[in-house]
Image: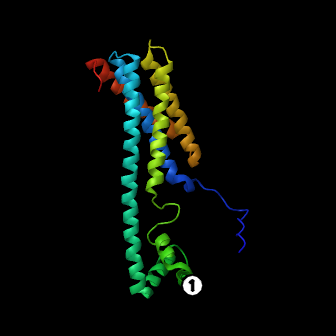
Amino acid sequence: MPKARRSPHTELHAVDRIGWLRAAVLGANDGIVSTASLIVGVAASGAGREALLIAGGAGLVAGAMSMAAGEYVSVSSQRDAEQADLKRETRELAEMPEHERQELTNIYIERGLDPDLARQVADQLTAKDALAAHARDELGISELTEARPIQAAFASAVSFSVGAGLPLLVTWLAPMAGLAIWVGTGSLIYLALLGFLGAYAGGANALRPTVRVVFWGAVAMAVTAGIGSLFGAVV
């Protein structure tokens, strides 16, 4: 059987990337902010380069594992809820198909179709794949929004590691004199770049996301630097 040819008018939308994009941006942002804040706070306490690298490396490993586990558990819970809804919908389609068909018709009427056309659409979609029609139009579950725990966990862990590796690299290469300033400045530049790239990939205006991530990153580093300076201890 020959393969169906892709339509030359097929469009690519930002929403197609929303699943992995959210996890990747969140992971990278958390990696930069948490690791840079940790290093800046420890540096403000007067610790040496070796202690800073150990602290940052430990933060990278712990953070990546935490992000992966958190995303997996969170998205798995979403998937479990989706599966429960689909099972209930499957049962209802088997037990009261006419009620479900009318439910689908009403959905299309509420979206602007006249009753006769809405009924025709509901009939045709029910004949083709009733569960898919109800999943998409009643439950809001589609291929684009379907929960994928492993994908989300992997994207979060990798992006966190990449983000955390950036302030660690600065810590390794920058001179000890003013190291906290080097790490803080470099991390804010990375955050600005991350905000821009995330907005660009999502098709949004870049200014607001960039300002947002830079602002909160600066706040986090300022707080940890103040704590390290005041108490002279690793927090």
Q: Is residue 35 visible?
A: yes
Direction left: furthest residue: 231
Q: Quadrant of the C terminus?
A: top left
Image position of 107 with respect to 15: above or below: below
Residue 113 locus on image (x, y percent): 55, 77
Name the residue nearer the viewer: 211 or 59.
Answer: 59
Please tell me how crowded label 1 is: few (under 14), some (14-19), or many (20+) other residues with Cα within 10 Å: few
At 47% from the left and 83% from the top, the residue drawn is 101
At 45% from the left and 24% from the top, the residue drawn is 184
At 44% from the left and 14% from the top, the residue drawn is 178
Query: Mark 1 highlights which residue?
Result: 120
Direction top: furthest residue: 177
Could you tell me which secondary element the residue under label 1 belongs to? helix
Residue 192 locus on image (x, y percent): 52, 33
Residue 28 locus on image (x, y percent): 47, 39
Query: Is residue 22 shown left or right of residue 43?
Result: right
Residue 139, image quadrant = bottom left
Image position of 8 with respect to 27: above or below: below
At 48% from the left and 21% from the top, the residue drawn is 172
Q: Is residue 187 visible?
A: no
Residue 9 locus on image (x, y percent): 71, 62
Name the residue nearer the viewer: 72 or 28.
Answer: 72
The amino acid type, in three-letter code, at marker 1 is Gln
